[in-house]
Amino acid sequence: MTDPAPLTAQDCLVALMITTSASDDNIRTAELIQISNVIETLPVFSDYDPDDIKRVANVVFDLFEQEDGLDALFGLVREALPRKLWETAYALACDVAAADGVVGQSEGRILEEIRYELNIDRLHAAAIERGARARHMTL
């Protein structure tokens, strides 16, 4: 496979949300709605073309098929995503994982990997995770 087109910072955020959703081999409707809502409402996506989501998803899925694809994805993310958005990326991934009300084992593992790869301080990560849980609670 040829090298994928460079990712923008916004593409990186989308890629990590898709990665989180796909981590359990079951992309749920609630997760897709969460991704869509984030892209439609957050200021960081104000000039993002939603048509790019499919291209980014294809990059993610192509990388998943490679032996070291996840490592390659994290390399692309660290290269293109400014450090000031690393906690944002983790927060968005946590929101996607929590969107269906259950953070399964594989989602938990991918969040741990994102936390490690983006060097998110454990205390900050705990606060981000708690916020995601609180936002997605049901009665």
Image (spheres, rainbow, N blue to C red):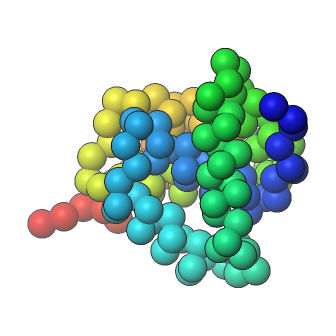
In x, y percent, where is residue 91? Answer: 54, 54
Horizontal side of 60 relative to 122 (left or right) equals: right
Question: How many numbered dots are placed on residues in this image?
Answer: 0
**Where the C terminus falls, by quadrant?**
bottom left
Measured from the top left, where is residue 72 in percent x and y? 76, 30
In this view, the residue in front, 112 or 50, is 50
Quadrant including the N terminus: top right
Spot occupied by residue 89 in the image (x, y as percentages of width and height): 63, 53
- At x 68% / y 24%, what residue is drawn? 66
Which residue is situated farthest in the left direction here? Answer: 139
Above or below: residue 135 compared with residue 73: below
Residue 98 is left or right of residue 89, and the answer is left
Q: Residue drawn 61% across and 40% down?
A: 61
Q: Is residue 75 above or below residue 30?
A: above
Q: Specify whether 65 is left or right of 21.
A: right
In the picture as drawn, the residue positioned furthest to the front comes out as: 1
Residue 131 visible (yes or no): no
**Residue at left 68%, top 34%?**
63
- What residue appears at the point 83 percent right and 43 percent down from the top-left corner? 4
Q: Is residue 38 visible?
A: yes
Q: Is residue 31 above or below residue 6?
A: below
Q: Position of residue 60 (x, y in %)?
A: 65, 43
